[in-house]
Image (cartoon, rainbow, N blue to C red):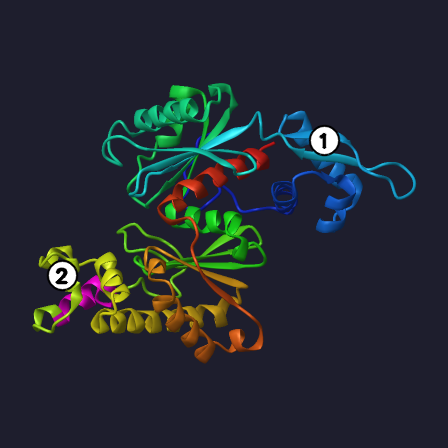
Amino acid sequence: MKIERSQAFTYRALQDKDKKVLSILDLLTSKGVISRTEVSRATGVNVVSISNYINSLIDKNLVLETGLDVSTGGRKPELVELNAKDNCVIGVDASGVGAAVLADTSMNVKAKVMLEGPHGGEGLPARILAAAEALCKKAGVTRDSIKAIGIGSLAGNINEGLVGDIKNLAALEAFSGDGLACAAYGEKRMNAACREGALLYVHSSLGACVLIKDGECIEPSAGNGKNAEGVKYLRPWDASLGVAHIARQPIAKGIGTAIVECAKGNMENVTEDTVIEAASKGDEVASNILQNVGTNLGLRIAYLINLFEPEAVALGGGLERAGERMLGPVRDTVMKFSLKAKSRPVKVVPASLGADGVATGAAWLAVREIFLRA
């Protein structure tokens, strides 16, 4: 098989049959045990076609038949479920955090470790494989149960031959996807508030966002990396709009604020976390900063809601840790300036996966790909 690399979440544009397979996978992961008839009803695909797809997945040992359901008349429906026991994947965040997780195909995360050494450069394939061995030991699973490795990366930071190196070293399938897209797909799969309909994922620190719609990824804006690509409906979030940059201005003017105390008197220690900490202590300067940044972010999100009509917006990247101090102004601004949000509900929620978002999404990338190729 020719090894390819893509900044997108998958290696190919989804065809109709791919979307059907992903619909089946989504039902199997969300429902557990389900009949072919129920899958047919939920997807709108005739039961003969559904049976052909499922039979192919059974032949690959990705799905198991588990018996017969109670009949309401006629032949009893056959029940199927994911063979999660025998099939696991590994997700790696090679975009900065360096987390690696092991999950089964139902996306039950069984273990987590951190990559040793630097996140990029020479030796990364070996460090990823060392993390894989550590994960297997920690989770108590055999190496044979690992079917693929998904890797979330930043554009330009990953060796072009990384997936090929892993395949050659360990005879494992490997798939590389943009880290931001992986984080978005992780939220789409794991965050209950984001499961239905299109999802707009916004990374508050990078000022970048992606849209997950009908199983595919659209990039309304791209990050600040020199090789960042995407449909730039918006410029990336400028550093001058960042919380840490804004916080340093009143400090430089000598305005009293608890941010200084939280940063231990060192301007270089002023970060999003120190501003959030100061706001949690009731500091007015820090609270105003979060409110103003939330308002600016809400304006951008309102624009994207009008353009793309998502059902949910997930805010990640770190600022979601501020809770309602940030989310409140975002929601208020969205309701004020988004015509779409006024006409129908649009959920604005914090990302749920935190620092493990890219690694978890990369694991889901691996699950998707092994099912698409089955």
Which residue position is annotated with label 2? 261
Q: Residue furthest bottom?
A: 336
- Is 303 in front, or is 288? 288
Left or right of 18 in this view: 134: left
Residue 162 on image: x %, y %? 35, 31
Tag in front: 1 or 2: 2
* Residue at image point 53% right, 57% down: 193
3D distance between C-alphas at marks 1 and 2? 63 Å
Residue 239 part of the magenta-drawn span: yes
How would you classify the magenta stretch by its main secondary structure? helix
| Numbered circles on residues, count | 2
Residue 349 part of the magenta-drawn span: no
* Residue at image point 22% right, 64% down: 278
Q: Residue furthest right?
A: 74
- Is 126 in front, or is 163? 126
In the rendered image, the quadrant that contains the C terminus is top right
Residue 148 on image: x %, y %? 48, 29
* Residue at image point 51% right, 47% down: 190
- Dividing the picture into quadrants, the one containing residue 127 is top left
371 is higher (above) or lower (below) than 7? above
**Crowd band around label 2 with a 10 angstrom C-alpha radius: few (<14), some (14–19), many (20+):** few
Give the residues drawn in magenta, as a range.
Answer: 238-250
- Dividing the picture into quadrants, the one containing residue 250 is bottom left
- Is 120 in front, or is 248? 248
User: The residue tagged with tag 2: helix, strand or loop?
Assistant: helix
Q: Is residue 1 visible?
A: no
- Is 173 in front, or is 357? 357
Q: Earlier in the sequence, mark 1 or mark 2?
A: 1
**Crowd band around label 1 with a 10 angstrom C-alpha radius: few (<14), some (14–19), many (20+):** some
**What type is the residue that disc 1 sits on?**
Asn
Which residue position is annotated with label 1? 55
User: The residue tagged with tag 1: helix, strand or loop?
Assistant: helix
